[in-house]
Image: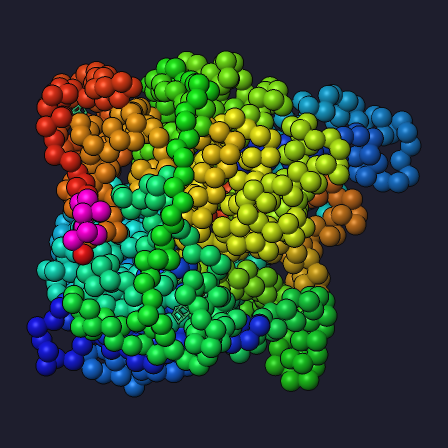
Amino acid sequence: MSDHASEPPVLEITGLCLSYYTRAGEVPAVYDFDLTVAKGESVGLVGESGCGKSTVANGVMRYMGHNGDIVGGTIKFKGRDMAEMSEEEIRRVRGKDIAMIYQEPMASLNPSLTIGQQLMEVPIIHEGVNKAEAFQRAYDMLSAVHIPDPKRLMISYPHQVSGGQQQRVVIAMALLSRPALLLLDEPTTALDVTVEAGIVELIAELSRETGSSLLYISHNLGLMLEVCDRICVMYSGEVVEEGTIDSIFSWPKHPYTQGLFGCIPLPHADKNARPLVSIKGQLPLPHERPEGCNFGPRCGFFEQGQCDKGLIPMEGVHTDDDPAHRVRCRRWEGIDVTEAVRVDEVREPIEVGETVLEVADMRKYYKVRDRSLAALVSGGAVREVKANESISFRAGEGETVAIVGESGCGKSTFAKVLMGLETATDGEVTLDGTDLGGIPVNKRTAAQLSSLQMVFQNPNDTLNPSHSVGYQIGRVIKRFGIERDSVKRKDRVYELLDTVKLPRAFMTRKPRQLSGGQKQRVGIARAFAGNPKTVIADEPISALDVSVAAAVTELLMDIQREHRTTLLFISHDLSAVRYLSDRVVVMYLGQIMERGSTGQIFAPPYHPYTEALLSAVPIADPEVERRRIVLEGSLPSPLDPPKGCPFSTRCPRKLGEICDNEAPPLQTNADRHVIACHIPLEELREVEPVISIPDRDELHAAQ
Amino acid sequence: MVQLIIRRIGMMILIMLVVALLLFLINEGDPRLIARSILGPYAQDQQLNAWVIENGYDRSVIVRYFEWIGRIFSGDLGDSVIYKRPVSEIFWDRLGNTGILAGVTFVIMVLIALTLGVLAGMKEGSLQDRAISVFSIITTSIPEYASAVFLVGIFVFWLGWLPGTSSMTSGFDPVQMILPVLVLTLYGFGYIARMTRASMAEVMTTPYIRTAVLKGLPYRHIILKHALRNALIAPFTVIMLQINWLLSGVVVTEFAFGYKGFGALLLEAALRRDIFVIEACGVAAVFVAVFTQTVGDLGYTYLNPRIRFK
Ligand SMILES: Nc1ncnc2c1ncn2[C@@H]1O[C@H](COP(=O)(O)OP(=O)(O)OP(=O)(O)O)[C@@H](O)[C@H]1O
Ligand code: SF4
Ligand code: SF4
Ligand SMILES: [Mg+2]
């Protein structure tokens, strides 16, 4: 925290009320919001989607869009009330004293100006420097954000560089004039984990150097733990709890904060012994907030007569870690919030049955035509992209196999081959004894189709907006010939809605009348309509809010338990993978780097890539220690992969020429645990664990 | 980019040849009709036949087509039936006149349209936006002949400031250009202005404009450097297509003001079946159409770095 007690805080918000005006009337998105950010401090703002985090950031910037307005309260920047500043003064504060970084780096850069032009204008406008100096400043800043070859970048257009680099450019732009306050609105949500790890480290490093204060908005509690000193938990337009990281993580007082912790798959969560607990219900819309406590309808500690009346004030909690810890709950003294997330029912683990799916040496090459004249002349007009290279693994009945890797590693291609949307170039994909690898989807029998179904990442893209939920599920049942009789078919749809825990009345709803989580449930119901033996779930929860994600995860596992379904879980979220899968396949650039049981993958010996992936995932538990490895560079183009080991361009443990030139051998560590690397297994076994988890029960005993 | 230009020019030539073939087939497909239009309505069948053979029109239509193309390239456009003079003598002159009228109108119209479009789109829903939008809708919905009559009423008969005709009988006179240019601009600018407005309004809501605002750039700078360039990409193609309209769409205006231009020539020729003039005008119109389309596409690619540097 700050040592400059006499100086006014960088940002001091009191009683802030922000509203949007829509056709339905005024939407009070944020009200009575207080927040102070001291010099050099970094404060996190967490909460579910729609709780008003971005609105706060926009309010601080005094940029509320054409239908938003600041309706009350004050925002003081370095002691000065911003409401009293003129337009011109505000403009000079923006970008110079307060800078902002957003979620979508590509969209926030101008597509028709070069990166250099966009960077240089900041010092030119704010400090009146000449072009040569502005160039130098921009160039130096690009080097400071660790961009290789800044010279080339200066003359590139945004679309010519990768997503991670774009975000670095946006960060460079924000830091160019060394702002006193940096607002970050989900700056890494759109990025891959390994890229995210680099960016997070960079932000911490640079803000330490420039002494900027940070207001860091995210829904990722693990990230908060890493970058922030203090956090504010927001719920439906107000702060419900605030305190230092240590205090909030060790002594959460608000049932909502505790609820959020119960939703994230921490390392000690276990799908059988300690399942996730989602928060029931949904965030109320700003104009439909209940009387009394906003969280009341979703709170397990709700007491009539106490929680449903009047405005609930923030009260000091004064924990050992933070005397300033405050919470907005009437009953905080009388309740033990950890009770809310304790589930005593211990579930039986599913026994894995016989092999259902076997993939042997599957390859998928795409041909791409190079239309440039040079390629036509040299005859190299058709090139191959090796999207999948010798993929082999097995999955048994009732087993969950996770496929992990960064975007572009070939996960989705693999799913497409399985589904028959693409045919394999080589190798076998055996499902229930038939080789499906070469059979495209339109040649598959109804039985083959129904035994293999898919749940997609974005529920919006896969549901037909013009048909009702019931119709869409019913059609799948009809197509697979499961139920011909229309009355029985309706019963079956009802059953499926029950299975995915949706009210039967949703039968007649259109997709647009559902929330994201509800749509994903419909997607799941549809996938399970044909009683599939195997379900591929392609990032089924990554588009969802934490609480909804927890609910959908649990739902998938309940259905799996009941039907003994084999689940292929495609994901980049290693916390979720650790939580729900039995086996893991780690892919990089179309090849399997390591595969084994979840226990084997998450403990040494690691493949160097697995090690880096594990170290990139932030964990929302201050007790867990994690070794950091930040990968340099980005994924090589699949058109031009490295000759030897695919990971050789970024591997921190690279041996030397052998890695560049020779494909690594498959080394078998234990039964079905295979690592593709030149480093001998004995040496890999010596590697220290990336994550060390203290024994929870011991900890509780000590308390 | 170079490769794209070559490909587009190749495409353009091909389209020209095909359209010219159609034009040729319609006009010269039946040799007896040509003979009829040249020899007049009272010529006997034998006369017609003799003329056809004498002038080589009994040969296959494809051979004649290529001969015709060859002649065009050497500058020979045939003889006008009405004026009994080589078409090229009248044609270039008229095309030039229309070129001047269209060129001046184009520059003024595009400047006004872009300025108003940008001003309107900059602040969507503002008073200035609504005023501009209503004005441009009104002007576009008044046909040229109506506004011509109206403007002549005001400036010629009432105020007496401007001449009512633009026949340029005593040499080129800029004052005579004012009314035709005004009529055309009024009618044509609204479309471009509305396209620009829509495009500008869309650009103003993009995250990169938000970035520019929150970088603390002055408003002028945001509009001129960040918004304009992106906002002009979409209307550019429309602007190029307006050239097309200017070449043929001026007929009414030229007639209204007695301006001796291309449109008037084409209308006259069509009414009196002056085959070779029709052909020359047709080829010119097709050329302009295909050419502006090509320039429009190439310009679009050039303005848009996302396509240019793929
Ligand atoms: N321009 C707008 N017009 C009307 N309502 C809006 C507008 N922008 C946001 N809202 C509403 O204000 C509330 C707060 O939205 P906000 O974007 O601040 O949430 P958030 O916490 O940033 O969510 P997310 O995590 O999804 O980014 C929501 O109910 C949202 O629907
Ligand atoms: S005030 Fe009552 S309803 Fe609200 S969080 Fe506290 S216990 Fe739950
Ligand atoms: S083979 Fe070499 S480059 Fe590849 S992972 Fe092993 S050490 Fe790294
Ligand atoms: Mg947001």
Q: Is residue A219 above or below residue A670?
A: below
Give the residues in magenta.
Answer: A694-702
- x and y percent of residue A159 in the render? 34, 45
Q: Nearer the viewer, residue A343 or A397?
A: A343
Q: Residue at x 12, y 63 (%)?
A: A210
Quadrant of the image occupied by residue B159? bottom right
- x and y percent of residue A511 in the render? 59, 50
Q: Nearer the viewer, residue B12 or A658?
A: A658
User: Is A501 one of the magenta-colored residues?
Assistant: no
Q: Principal SS element in the magenta part? A: helix
Q: Is residue A439 above or below residue A559?
A: above
Q: Nearer the viewer, residue B125 or A635?
A: A635
Residue A617 seen in the figure: yes
Q: How many marks?
A: 0
Quadrant of the image occupied by residue A574? top left
- x and y percent of residue A465 in the render? 61, 48
Left or right side of B310 for A480? right
- x and y percent of residue A193 in the render? 28, 43
Q: Residue at x 62, y 54 (%)?
A: B245
